[in-house]
């Protein structure tokens, strides 16, 4: 089951990356990891550095994908973003935390994407 979930996650991240590129985003990092956690995608768009969490599901039986980005997960993403900012020595830049939901179809290769910009905020 874990391998299946990882495959679904990777598929959703690929779909999200293409979606963002088509909107003019520039991808800076994919799967940035440190001791604090992981950020799926880091991109720039319209003067913002966007830290993006991708959630992929086949169904919404247990809620929409973004609901799984709990306060605890948000805190991990925030701490990981701080590490990224320090490592890259980024100053005087706007930051944003986005969530992208990817819903896959059981029946065919169709999918839908819901991009929630500025999905949550935590103080820097």
Image (spheres, rainbow, N blue to C red):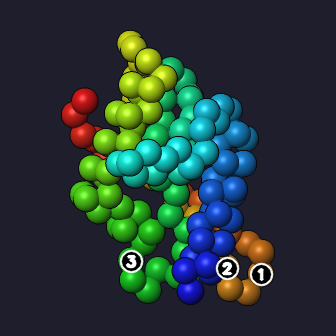
Q: In what element is the residue under mark 2?
A: loop
CA neighbours of label 3 inside 10 A, class few (<14), some (14 to 19), many (20+)? few
Mark 1 or mark 3: whose residue is earlier in sequence: 3
Residue 38 rendering spot, x and y as whole percentages: 46, 51
**66, above or below 116, in the image:** below
Disc 2 target residue: 105
**119, above or below 87, in the image:** below
Q: In what element is the residue under mark 1?
A: loop
Q: Quadrant of residue 83?
A: top left
**Which part of the image, by quadrant, shows the C terminus?**
top left
Q: In what element is the residue under mark 3?
A: loop
Disc 1 target residue: 108
* Alpha-carbon span between mark 3 and mark 2: 16 Å
CA neighbours of label 1 inside 10 A, class few (<14), some (14 to 19), many (20+)? few
* Alpha-carbon span between mark 2 and mark 1: 6 Å
Do the CB atoms of the residues marked 3 and 2 lie less than 8 Å apart? no
CA neighbours of label 2 inside 10 A, class few (<14), some (14 to 19), many (20+)? few
Q: Which mark is residue 63?
A: 3
Residue 25 in sight here: no
- Nearer to me, 103 or 95: 95
Residue 106 placement, left or right of 64 = right
Say which residue appears at 68% left-offset and 65% top-offset: 11
- Nearer to me, 3 or 123: 3
Say which residue appears at 44% left-offset and 33% top-offset: 84
Do the CB atoms of the residues marked 2 and 1 lie less than 8 Å apart? yes
**93, above or below 58, in the image:** above
Do the CB atoms of the residues marked 1 and 3 lie less than 8 Å apart? no
- Nearer to me, 36 or 108: 36
């Amino acid at each position: 089951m874990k391998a299946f979930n990882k495959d679904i996650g990777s598929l959703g991240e690929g779909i999200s990356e293409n979606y963002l590129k088509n909107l003019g985003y520039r991808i800076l990092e994919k799967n940035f990891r440190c001791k604090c956690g992981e950020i799926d995608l880091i991109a720039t768009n319209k003067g913002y550095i966007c830290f993006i969490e991708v959630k992929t599901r086949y169904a919404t039986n247990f809620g929409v994908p973004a609901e799984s980005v709990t306060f605890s997960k948000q805190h991990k993403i925030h701490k990981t973003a701080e590490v990224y900012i320090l490592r890259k020595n980024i100053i005087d830049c706007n930051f944003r935390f986005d969530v992208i939901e990817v819903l896959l179809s059981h029946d065919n290769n169709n999918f839908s994407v819901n991009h929630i910009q500025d999905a949550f905020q935590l103080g820097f």
